[in-house]
């Protein structure tokens, strides 16, 4: 599959997840391994509004070589998929719906809020 086709597929997948209510706002990210690095959704971008041309392109060393700045989880994505016997071809992260609530409210604890 060409890089252009991968970019378009990432945008379609992101929109599908957003439209089904699996993510909201700018939460979640999608990354796809390339022969020479990664394509990653840009930081602060809604998965429902991905512009294929603006996906971040990261080289094998982790440097941005094209597009907008990558997801804040770029390091985690690269770390969790590098060195595996067969590196993952893609990585999708969607935080649990409660995560933004816990991140925004200082007084939450494990016992006061349950899914």
Image: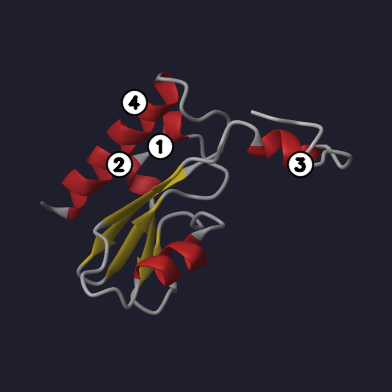
Q: Are marks 1 and 4 in contact (CB under 8 Å)?
A: no
Q: Residue at x 51, y 58 (%)?
A: 69
Mark 3, residue position: 110
Mark 1, residue position: 50
**Callout 1: SS:** loop
Compare residues 113 and 35 and report the one nearer the observer: 113
Estimate the spatial distance between the alpha carbons at disc 4 and disc 2, rounded to whole Å. 10 Å
Q: Earlier in the sequence, mark 4 or mark 3?
A: 4
Estimate the spatial distance between the alpha carbons at disc 1 and disc 4, rounded to whole Å. 11 Å
Quarter of the image where one finds residue 97: top right
Q: Is residue 100 visible?
A: yes
Residue reaching furthest to the front: 111
Q: Are marks 4 and 2 in contact (CB under 8 Å)?
A: no
Q: Residue at x 45, y 35 (%)?
A: 47
Q: Position of residue 63 (x, y in %)?
A: 44, 74
Q: Residue at x 39, y 28 (%)?
A: 17
Q: Are marks 1 and 2 in contact (CB under 8 Å)?
A: yes
Estimate the spatial distance between the alpha carbons at disc 4 and disc 3, rounded to whole Å. 31 Å
Which mark is on residue 10? 2
Is 89 left or right of 111, judged from the image as shown? left
Nearest to the eye among marks 3 and 2: give it.
3
Say few, some or many: other residues with alpha carbon within 10 Å of mark 3 (under 14 / 14 to 19 / 20 or more): few
Is 84 left or right of 103, judged from the image as shown? left
Q: Position of residue 65 (x, y in %)?
A: 39, 68
Compare residues 94 and 19 and report the one nearer the observer: 94
Mark 4, residue position: 16
Q: Position of residue 73 (x, y in %)?
A: 53, 58
**Callout 4: SS:** helix
Q: Position of residue 110 (x, y in %)?
A: 76, 41
Q: Are marks 4 and 3 in contact (CB under 8 Å)?
A: no
Q: Earlier in the sequence, mark 1 or mark 4?
A: 4
């Amino acid at each position: 599959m060409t890089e252009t086709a991968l970019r378009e597929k990432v945008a379609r997948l992101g929109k599908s997840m957003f439209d089904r209510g699996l993510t909201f706002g700018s939460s979640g990210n999608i990354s796809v391994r390339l022969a020479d690095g990664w394509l990653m959704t840009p930081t602060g971008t809604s998965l429902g509004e991905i512009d294929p041309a603006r996906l971040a392109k990261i080289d094998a060393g982790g440097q941005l070589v094209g597009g907008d700045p990558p997801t804040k989880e770029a390091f985690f994505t690269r770390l969790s998929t590098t060195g595996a016997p067969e590196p993952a071809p893609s990585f999708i992260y969607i935080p649990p719906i409660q995560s933004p609530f816990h991140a925004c409210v200082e007084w939450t604890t494990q016992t006061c809020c349950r899914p």
